[in-house]
Image: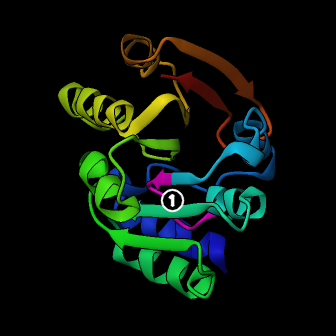
């Protein structure tokens, strides 16, 4: 049922959803594996969609860690609130990820930045200027040595990541539909 709802959302909002199917467990595990979760206290997920990555983050995040999801699609916000809303370290807001810097400051109440941003945003259909602004704002939201994790179905985002982060590592996940590149980017 969840896959059918996800596909229906893709048909209704292809620029917001960006994929035909939710992320696979193989993609989730590859994306999240480089992180030392004992050190993570603040996480923002931009574009959590139906929560495939969110589930992986929440399983790994310590009870002291805090999670903020930023999702533009009201159906996904409702679904994620229903699934995770009882967890005290989980929050989600309906907003644009372009505002990640201010939203994370407001939510976490800190100027020093956040530990980790995970983005599931579909960058491909977005204009280049918007892609650059999203990545730049994400980078400014992170504390020194903070990490951005991303996945994409093509490598067009890589030059923008390299402009904004001192470390950019790429991997490939074949066991996903479609296959995807994962990125580990450190400020």
Colouring used for the render: rainbow
Magenta stretch: includes residue 165: no
Between 130 and 14, the one lying in front of the other is 130
The one nearer the camera, 44 or 122, is 44
Quadrant in which residue 89 is drawn: bottom right
Main SS of the magenta segment?
A: loop
Is residue 71 at all visible to an observer of this figure? Answer: no
Horizontal placement of 136 versus 152: left or right? Answer: left
Q: Is residue 118 left or right of residue 34?
A: left
Measuring 52% from the left and 50% from the top, which residue is drawn there? Answer: 19
Tell me the quarter of the picture where residue 104 sits.
bottom left
Query: Residue lying furthest left in this view?
Result: 129
Q: Position of residue 26 (x, y in %)?
A: 81, 44
- In the rendered view, tell whether residue 102 sits above or below residue 91: above
Front one among 156 and 161 = 161
Which residues fall within the magenta stretch?
44-51
Where residue 143 appears, x then y in whole percent?
45, 34
Q: Residue at x 55, y 75 (%)?
A: 5
Tell me the SS state at disc 1.
loop
Question: As drawn, is 117 to the left or to the right of 105?
Answer: right
In the rendered image, the vertical position of residue 174 relative to residue 119, given as above or below:
above
Q: Which residue is label 1 attached to? A: 48
State the image coordinates of residue 175 (x, y, percent, origin top left).
Answer: 80, 39
Residue 61 makes an appearance in the image: yes
Query: For residue 57, what is the image quadrant?
Result: bottom right
Of the 4 image quadrants, the one containing the N terminus is bottom right
Mark 1 surroundings: few (<14), some (14-19) or many (≥20) residues within 10 A: many
């Amino acid at each position: 049922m969840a896959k059918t709802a996800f596909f229906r959302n893709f048909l209704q909002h292809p620029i917001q959803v960006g994929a035909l199917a939710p992320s696979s467990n193989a993609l989730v595990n590859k994306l999240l594996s480089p992180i030392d979760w004992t050190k993570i206290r603040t996480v923002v997920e931009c574009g959590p969609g139906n929560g495939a990555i969110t589930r992986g983050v929440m399983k790994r995040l310590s009870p002291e860690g805090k999670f903020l999801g930023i999702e533009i699609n009201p159906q996904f916000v409702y679904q994620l609130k229903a699934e995770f809303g009882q967890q005290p370290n989980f929050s989600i807001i309906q907003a644009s990820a372009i505002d990640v810097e201010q939203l994370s400051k407001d939510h976490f109440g800190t100027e020093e930045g956040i530990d980790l941003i995970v983005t599931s945003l579909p960058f491909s259909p977005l204009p280049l200027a918007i892609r650059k602004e999203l990545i730049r704002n994400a980078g400014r939201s992170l504390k020194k040595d903070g990490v951005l994790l991303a996945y994409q179905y093509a490598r067009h985002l890589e030059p923008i990541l390299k402009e904004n982060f001192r470390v950019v590592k790429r991997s490939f996940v074949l066991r996903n539909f479609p296959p995807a590149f994962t990125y580990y980017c450190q400020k």
